[in-house]
Image (spheres, helix red, strand yellow):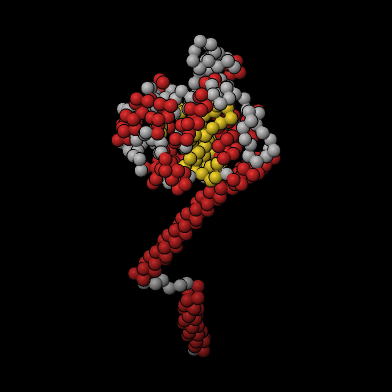
């Protein structure tokens, strides 16, 4: 009997301990789960929170993009300002260099007796926007009168244009080989009537155009402190307003050479009109000239005109004046501007362009190197291709 009782007691103890162990294990399991595992949130709330995080990320990226675009615009603005400042500084330095060179040569006189830029003349020089020299000859009185009757202002209007707009226009001419000849006296009489000549220390002659060009720029630079200096022939039609507006676009540039750029053949045959005696300098027969502006009309900036004035005794003269001018700028930091509106044809070419709103600066016939029969035809060109007499007053 005693033996069975002990067995029953051992079984009861074992069952109790099993129960206690199970309960303890369950409690420890609950405690472990709460500490190491996060109870997932309800499905809808979890998705909403995820969407908010995505929206915040998109907004943040959008702000970053806008900030970057703003920074890019700021950078481009600074680059533009820097470029403009460099251009302005470049022009200022070039001007100072030219003035320094002019001061050094202030006591020198040109080989042809043309004026140099002395300290006294620097202080007396009149400020101007541009100075235009209309190349003319003793025999061209009718051409001059046809220009006066069309595109060149006269009398008080010419003086007013100079005072108010800084636009100076003069017929440029030298003197005859004989002192105080009848030719010179005729020009003196014409000057007394119109007051529109610039007399040069130069002996007139067709084959001396290169020398005349050098003398013109030297004389003009000594008399006027202009932004641009222009040479034009007296058988070319010019719209002054378009010319002024075009030059104004290049005012901030230090060394510009503006015209209809060309590169014609070097003619070695003596029988042709534009024979080049020094053709051998341009290489093999059949070669072309370097790029240069056609001689009917071109403009150069102040620094280049001053350069010619200072160095004119040593600037080489070729047979053709436009080639000579182009050669003087080789080796210099010069911007060549090819403006085809400076070499339009006569009607109907310039007329069609004017009707389309593209008014030409200058018109002439290539076949005649000017307007063919200009005395009779310049009025027609002016009527069909002119910009209007008042255009120059509102151009700048």
Name the residue located 44 percent from the left edge and 28 percent from the top edge. 234
- Percent position of residue 334, x then y: 56, 35
Residue 93 seen in the current view: no
Name the residue located 40 percent from the left edge and 30 percent from the top edge. 145
On screen, residue 337 versus residue 110, left or right, reads: left
- The answer to whether residue 128 is above or below residue 375 is below
- Percent position of residue 164, x then y: 45, 48
* Quadrant in which residue 309 is drawn: top right
- Looking at the image, which is closer to me, 24 or 296? 296
Give the tally of numbered discs: 0
- Percent position of residue 193, x then y: 44, 35
* Quadrant in which residue 326 is drawn: top right
- Percent position of residue 360, x then y: 38, 34
- The answer to whether residue 308 is above or below residue 77 is above
- Looking at the image, which is closer to me, 162 or 26? 162
Residue 197 seen in the current view: yes
Name the residue located 43 percent from the left edge and 32 percent from the top edge. 342
Name the residue located 37 percent from the left edge and 66 percent from the top edge. 47
């Amino acid at each position: 009997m005693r033996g069975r009782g002990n067995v029953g007691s051992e079984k009861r103890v074992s069952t109790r301990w099993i129960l206690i162990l199970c309960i303890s294990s369950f409690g420890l399991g609950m405690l472990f789960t709460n500490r190491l595992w996060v109870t997932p949130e309800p499905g809808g709330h979890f998705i909403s929170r995820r969407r908010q995080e995505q929206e915040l990320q998109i907004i943040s990226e959008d702000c970053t993009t806008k900030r970057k675009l703003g920074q890019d615009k700021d950078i481009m603005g600074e680059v533009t300002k820097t470029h403009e400042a460099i251009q302005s500084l470049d022009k200022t330095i070039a001007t100072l260099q030219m003035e320094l060179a002019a001061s050094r040569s202030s006591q020198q006189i040109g080989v042809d007796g043309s004026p140099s830029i002395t300290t006294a003349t620097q202080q007396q020089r009149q400020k101007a926007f541009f100075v235009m020299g209309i190349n003319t000859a003793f025999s061209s009185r009718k051409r001059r009168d046809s220009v006066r009757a069309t595109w060149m202002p006269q009398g008080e209007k010419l003086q007013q244009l100079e005072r108010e707009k800084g636009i100076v226009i003069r017929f440029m001419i030298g003197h005859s080989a004989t002192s105080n000849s009848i030719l010179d006296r005729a020009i003196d009489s014409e000057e007394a009537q119109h007051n529109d000549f610039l007399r040069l220390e130069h002996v007139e002659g067709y084959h001396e155009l290169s020398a005349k060009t050098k003398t013109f720029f030297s004389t003009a630079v000594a008399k006027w402190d202009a932004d641009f200096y222009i040479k034009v022939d007296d058988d070319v039609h010019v719209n002054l307003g378009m010319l002024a507006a075009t030059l104004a676009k290049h005012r901030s540039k230090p060394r510009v050479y503006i015209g209809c750029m060309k590169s014609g053949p070097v003619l070695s045959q003596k029988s042709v009109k534009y024979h080049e005696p020094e053709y051998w300098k341009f290489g093999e027969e059949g070669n072309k000239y370097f790029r240069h502006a056609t001689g009917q009309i071109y403009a150069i900036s102040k620094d280049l005109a001053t350069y010619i004035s200072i160095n004119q005794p040593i600037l080489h003269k070729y047979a053709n004046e436009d080639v000579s001018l182009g050669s003087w700028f080789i080796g210099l930091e010069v911007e060549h501007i090819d403006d085809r509106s400076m070499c339009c044809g006569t009607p109907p070419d310039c007329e069609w362009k004017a009707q389309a709103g593209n008014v030409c600066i200058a018109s002439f016939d290539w076949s005649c190197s000017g307007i063919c029969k200009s005395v009779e035809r310049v009025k027609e060109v002016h009527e069909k291709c002119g910009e209007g007499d008042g255009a120059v007053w509102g151009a700048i």
